[in-house]
Image: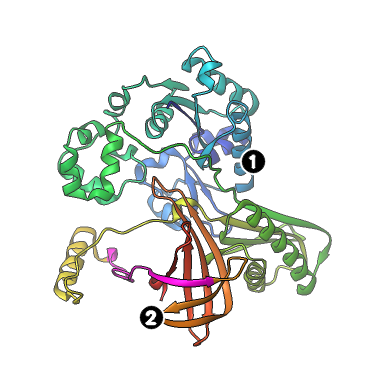
Amino acid sequence: MRILCMILDQLPIEVEIQRNPQLAKKPLVLLRPCNQRVLIAAKSLHDIRINPGESRRSVEQRYPNAFFLTATESLYQKKHTQLKNILGRFCTDIESNALGEFFISTTMLSRIFKSEADLCAKVVQQIVAETQLPVTVAIAGNKFTAYCASLQANPTCTIPMGKEADFLASLPLTALINPPSELLRRLNTFGIKTLGEFAQLPRGSVVRQFGPELAHFHDMACGNDNRILKPFTYPPTIILSQTLTNPLSDIQPTQSILHKLTTQLSQRLEQSGYHANALTLSITDESEHSKHINTSIKPPTSTDIRLQRISSNLLSQLKNTYPIIKIELKAYPLHEWHKNTYQIKLFEQHKNRYNKHALQKTIGSLKQRFGEHAIQFANNVGPPKPKGLRVHCDPAGIPSKLQIRKQTYMVKHIHQHWRVQSQWWHNPIERDYYQVNISDGRLITLFCDHKETWFLDRAVH
């Protein structure tokens, strides 16, 4: 299979430069309006490693000359959708895992275009003609190589079949997709700085040194990536707003309008199959001054009642903002890569005994290497695995009765229901979670996987 990758690197930055070309010369940092934290920073600030989520104050301390601008996330989403729609004229099955990043298969397209170089050129030509944005396009034998080639393209690039490893060899280790910092640190200690040097290591040695769960990074360095294309659209930030003809000075009608917006939000989430994991409320007064407040949602939800309760609570915290002329509700849907994460074990527990000496030794090593502030808190060390359950469901598939330790309990009330759908690497997750009250008064969480097998989620207790 041959895969085409199209990228608009740093889409938000490029969109802002398109709006104001003078920004191209500035060390630009875009801040989310809800919390004044970094959304993205220009490449000119790469050396000081400004990460998304950092506070404005933190950036100012390290780079006082940074130029800050409030992000317009709805505009970035529109540009992302426009790019996707244009690429959709070439192939309808599109995988998109991030803003401005797209993958398609070229199998059918090879019959239409005389060469891969011609296909790349036509895609760039179409995009630039309609958006005037600097996209890059590359074709290679797998997703990882196509992605790396697209970042290097000027503006197009094709990697011949079998030459993936040769192309990747000179790239730095940071070209890997979200590599653990400890992996990079240890490879750097060994003097290994490029993908080519990493690929020269025997795979068995890599597995013994870093564990089988990190072996896929070595595979990628060797030019091997078995991930198949999975048509998936980057979940857009859902933004709903209402501009008022007559300003509101009372909280009751404001609550009513907000409830209507949350109902629409719930419908949008359920139609798309997403769940909101964060919510931002913005209100604008007659002087066109806006105030923003946000909160995370745990567990993520698309339920109308719960979204209304959360948004009403946010509104009660925004004071001295009347009269109101505009209300905006913004939801950040759950992304697939938020799930199936893990932490490398710091130490092994033997015979279920608490090894205090090993823990103290580990903490001491971390403090010595990374400083006193590296240690903040620890929680859920070695969480228990989910336990299989026998569950009886009603005709609609809702749990009504279950058995724990040979004791049968009735489900009295279902507090929450949410769904997790993830396609991270080659290990898909599909689960329906239920938080329920059972007949002995306990509140428990259980879930059903795609094989319709039920489990008690003991890790949340």
Q: Which quarter of the figure is the C terminus placed in?
A: bottom left
Vertical side of 323 occupied by 200: above or below:
above
The image quarter containing residue 370 is: bottom left
- Tell me which secondary structure the magenta stretch mostly adopts: loop
Task: Look at 17% across and 63% down and name the residue there.
Answer: 365
46 is within the stretch colored magenta: no
Q: Which residues are magenta?
A: 373-392
CB of mark 2 within 8 Å of CB of mark 1? no
388 is within the stretch colored magenta: yes
The answer to whether 327 appears left or right of 381 in the picture is right
In the rendered image, residue 360, in percent from the top left (x then y), is placed at 17, 71
Task: Look at 63% across and 27% down and name the residue there.
Answer: 89
Vertical side of 455 occupied by 272: above or below:
above
Residue reaching furthest bottom?
Answer: 440
The image quarter containing residue 168 is: top left
> Where does label 2 land, which residue?
405
> Where does label 1 land, which residue?
78
In the rendered image, residue 141, in percent from the top left (x then y), is placed at 39, 27
In the rendered image, residue 49, in percent from the top left (x then y), is placed at 37, 46
Task: Look at 27% across and 47% down and name the residue there.
Answer: 214
The answer to whether 459 appears left or right of 128 in the picture is left
Residue reaching furthest top?
Answer: 114
Q: Which mark is residue 306?
A: none
Say which element carries label 2. loop
